[in-house]
Amino acid sequence: MLKSSLRAATSALCLSLLACIGFVSQADAAAKCIKGDRKPPFTLGWANIYSVPTWMKQTEGTIAAEVEDLKKQGLVSKLVITDAQGDANTQIQQIQSMIDANVDAIILIAGSSTAPARVIADACAKGIAIINFDSLVDTDQVTAKINTDSAQWGAGAAKWLIDSIGGKGKIIILNGPAGVSVSDDRRKGAEPVLKANPGVTILAETNTAYNVAPAQEAVSNLLFANPQIDGVLSLGGALSAGAVLAFDKQGRAQVPISGENARQFLELWKQKGLKGWATMQPNWLGAFAAYTAVQALSGKDVQAFVKVPLPVIDNSTIDSYLARADKFPADGYIYSPYDQALFDRLLAQK
Amino acid sequence: MSGSDPVLSPSPLYWPVQRQRNRGVRALFCVVAAFVAIYAYLFPGLLSIGGLSKFCQSWFPLALVSMAQAILMLTGGINLAIGATVSLGAVIAATTMSGPLGAPGAIAAVAFAGLGIGAICGLIVVRLRLPAIIVTLAGSFIIGGMALLVLPRPGGEIPAWFSDFLAGGTPVAALLLALIVLAWKLYLATPLGLSLYAAGENPVAAYRSGVPVDAARIAAYAISGLLSTGAGLYVAAQTGSGDPVIGQAFTLNSIAAAVLGGVGFLGGHGTMRGAIAGSLLLSVMVNVMFFLGFPPVAQYVAQGLIIIGAVALPQIGARGRRA
């Protein structure tokens, strides 16, 4: 009697477990927004916020190259590109047009971290795969977000700079534009590190576009005002190049400076023998987003957030970047090599 | 004055006068109609309620700021603070709407901010006799800074019902635009409205004829501010949130739309219908080029060509008539 009821209980348990697994795997089978009714070859929409900066052009280059690859595999038929010319409202309008044209996937760099949320939710509801990378949107109505960790970017740069000036001294901080999430998040990441080092005085902070010229001008002004600067916490590659040029123009001795894989900065670093540190927001995030969109549309599960690790470029690794410099535009970014195997590894990570 | 009143007592002169006023913008109307037709051909979904609503939603804020710019240009002024004022309207809406005062409180705050900012700009320009271009440029920094103070980074919240009401699947935006145009017609029939053109065309002569030039200009600034923050409120509803830099592009686009619509920089010349048609052209152009599959670089070129074409057409037409 006991035995049979035990058996019954066990089998019931097994059944419910099986049902559970079945349910879970069914729910997990497709990524968010994917309904499974779209068949290859797919049409991809690339909703760019601004196509003029070199970083964007290079990123678009990796997307176009990836799409060519996917076309050869018969997975993609067409890539539709829009450029909102920096206006978040236009970007929303263009995403709406992509929905109207019934593209299968939209990959985007958001012009505002909040504004596109509603139109993206509309797209998601229509079964369009949404892959958002670099500048992210505050919504979970996307298939996947792909990015490096901006806070870690800022924290890493601050930690290195403070170590290299011996834990105390006067520094200036160069930020990207105000009110933009990426620039805000990098600065936020640096904050706890700066707070923990009361010996470090912040003389001034700048907010400029991620371009050499405005950064150079801003730093020139700060140099006039501050006879002693021990370090530059730059939170963007072009900003660092601008700062180095400003120091150089005024004949001031270079100081430790953080930055990014901007070719100009890396070359100045080597040329001037700087004490430098840099990381990288890889341009191939674009190619990776296109690849991820097709993976999701093909029914593979994709995590809601795919974190791409930040590399460290220092005196021991800078040569591996500069060795490939001639393959990149003079004002561009020297990104690390990538291939499909890397993308598969990044998608498989937990 | 009531004899020439364009709205309240339709005289036999009303339609001939309107035809006369339409002369400069007739070519633009044709171009806009052609583009809307092309758009409808490329995207038949436009002709559904949902499609039309979505399109009007993306056009509506630009239509509002184009009116805001046109009203000032008619008085001989210009407003370079429109973008910043839109941003401020958006962040005020996004930060107050979920607060204790709710939607009515937020709308009141947005309207008050717009009218107040506009009136202050107007007072400075008119009373201190300073150039509008300098005052509003400086104003754009101050107002833009205020927007960043209210909301340092994108965020805030607009209740879903409010967003769905203004920017859901219904043509509320089109209806609102019709109401605002009607209000503009009524305003033109008031003494201040009637003074608007006179103050822009020849302020000295108008002043000597007893036209309240200063009051008309200050009122125009206040209305311009109100329309701008109103556009910000709508953008906030449309996006469901506030962004302190969302309005930036509106300054230049509003000037482009007004000029496209035949509103002159020197004041007194142009019509509101022209400015609205100009904004419609700018907005529909983005969608037409998308559906034509133009690559972005070609879009820059095409945009420039269309704008030059739309401005040149009436000139060519006028020359043809004279010959």
Image: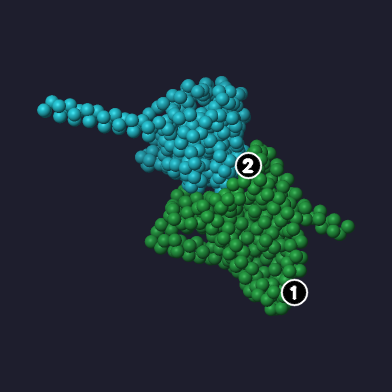
Where residue B173 appears, x then y in whole percent? Answer: 55, 57
- Report if residue A29 is visible in the image: yes
Give the mark nearer the N terminus: 1 vs 2: 1
Residue at the image position 57 percent from the left and 46 percent from the top: A93
Give above or below for A45 relative to B247.
above
The quarter of the image holding the N terminus of chain A is top left
Q: Is residue A186 left or right of residue B178?
A: left
Front of the two marks 1 and 2 = 1
Q: Chain letter for cyan?
A: A
- The verdict on a common chain for dots 1 and 2 is yes
Q: Please name whichever residue, B321 or A182, is drawn nearer the observer in this view of the structure.
A: B321
Tag 2 secondary structure: helix
- Between B136 and A342, the one lying in front of the other is A342
- B128, A85: nearer the viewer: A85
Q: Residue at horizontal 71%, vertical 70%? A: B198
Q: Which residue is mark 1?
A: B12
Specify the amino acid type for callout 2.
Answer: Phe
Q: Quadrant of residue B137?
A: bottom right
Checking the image for residue B290, the label placed there is 2
- The x, y position of residue A126, in whole percent, is 49, 41
Per the image, label 1 sits on a secondary structure element best described as: loop
> Can residue B205 be seen at all in this image of the molecule?
no
